[in-house]
Image (spheres, rainbow, N blue to C red):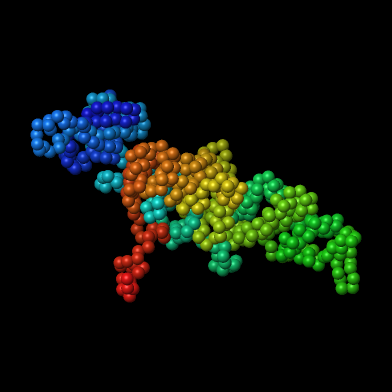
Amino acid sequence: MIVGRITKVDGVRAAATFFDRMQPFIVNNGQAVASPRINSFVKTGVGLDTVICQIVGEHEAEYDRRSEVTREVQAAPIGPFVVDLEVRGYISSGDFKGGLRCLPIVGAAVESLDSENLKLLYSSHGSKPLRIGSSLFDESRSVYLDAGRLMASHIGIFGNTGSGKSNTLASLLKGYVGCLPKETDAVRILIFDLNNEYGGDAIVPRDKKTVYRLNTRKQLGLNRDRVPLSFDSLDEDSWGTILRATPRTQMPAVRRAYSKWRSEPDANYISEIKRSIADKRETLFFTLRNYCPELIKGIDNLAFNRTNGSFYYDNGQGRQYINSISDVRDIVIKPGIDRFQMFYLWLALEVSRAAESGINFEFVQPLLPRAKSVIRDLEKIFSDAPCAGLQAIFDNKPLAVVQLGDVNEASREMLPALIAELVMRRASENKGDGTPREVVTLVVDEAHNLLGYDVTQSDSVHGNTLRIFEKVIKEGRKFGVFLCLASQRPSDISPTITSQIHNYFIHKLVNPNDIERIRKTVSFMGETSLSMLSVLGQGECIVSGPSLHMPQYVYIDQLDSCSRPNSNDIQLFGDNGLLEQTALEKWEF
């Protein structure tokens, strides 16, 4: 149905004059459809192709006011009805394509879209359509995404608290898991749950996922979940991440300790320590004794005579000086220490050597108290599982949730970085010279807490975590590793990360800094769309990316109460409200 004509073309923008104001609904080919209005679509022909445009503005054209001079009373005249258009793509060979191959021409007829045209725009262009909701301006139209192009991509979900981003994240993950074959190990989703919101039946029933509720505040053995991890999978870079080692001063000691731990038998711990005693290396020995008394038995039985520079035993009858390694006795590694502690011993030896030499010791020494604290936490959240890889973490399920709400801040930063690094390494090794053989999506909710950008933290644990996730989003696609993040503060997240996202889901944003970040990052967001961000309602969002034909205004489907994450707004009044009305009546104002 022809509704007007193109009157102006300026690049990707155009204007059209409609013949008349239209009723809310018009009859097109025997079907009642919504009339063209703001954010709806129209078409115009260019040769054999059909250009699709979106209405982004409307106004009345100028009219001749001279006719009003001779009349005392006159209703405001209605001039021609003009709409502003932006080109979104074209239909060619029965398929919609985004792009600017075709542009409107002045004088061409403008038509409303029929049901077949609308189906092309709102349907998925992949083999696995995933419904996410309905069109915000035409609720009768379902919006579908291409599940393959959605999850094999980096995803960003942004919106103020209470705008519906947690529901959007859970809906996407639930829908994606539902698209997977029942028996597959080629696709995995790992959620870093910073607020313990995705346990229970959130997203999928609890028997369809593996949940690790980690806790660094309890002692070992008290109903603690621990992530299975092969200790052998930790390389020197992993240890650098774990210990937050500074690249220039501390990392060399970490590398030497790692090399010795991997290449030399455990018995050499004792040999190294006994040799230091026999060689009268006071500084090295006492550094070891200060930092490893709980690991080395017999080390407290030795004393040092600074007059003659020798170690000795006090056997109750006098001093027994040590003149050779054969005189050293009772020095053994205490039984029951795990492999994390074994690595700590080698690290202590390397730091002790730095203390002995005096070179950069004040910069290297902080490694040991930090390592002792970190390893103590590692033992609470990891279990050494020989040959354990991603399969062990997921336990033959497509979804795993690592809950970090009860984990201290240092471990909350370190653990996701460590796992992300291991996932990237495994993916790189598995790919070889071919295409990736598996896809892993790392999900971070409340991402501003983990991926916030601060140039002053480049050498801190946070800076190290940020570096690893920036590597994931820059290089992960070619290895089948993707990042999905949700945040209420896009302006706080590293620009490197926000700039590499493929599919965007943008809910209500009101902070000017957040809106400005979206303006600089998301190419499809024009001023019209940006102006709408601050007035979007709960559950409403703008969606764009390769998973659908063009940007869409969508009302996201609401999950049932069982599948929602535990992040609902608090209800104070009414049925099941936190506060009963009768409880308030006793207050007098």
In the image shown, does 205 or 42 lie closer to the viewer?
42
Q: Where is residue 64 in the image (x, y as percent from the top left)?
A: 16, 29
Q: Which residue lies furthest to the bottom in this view?
A: 586
Residue beneath the point at 41% across and 45% down: 512
| Left or right: 550 in relation to 404 | left
| Left or right: 76 in relation to 452 | left
Quarter location, residue 141: top left
Tally of numbered tags: 0
In the image shown, does 255 or 228 lie closer to the viewer?
255
18 up-or-down from 565: above or below: above
In the image shown, does 388 or 175 lie closer to the viewer?
175
In the image shown, does 549 or 287 lie closer to the viewer?
287
Q: Where is residue 98 in the image (x, y as percent from the top left)?
A: 36, 33
Where the C terminus falls, by quadrant? bottom left
Residue 423 appears anywhere in the view:
no
Residue beneath the point at 34% across and 51% down: 539
Residue beneath the point at 55% across and 41% down: 431
339 up-or-down from 50: above or below: below
Residue beneath the point at 12% across and 38% down: 75
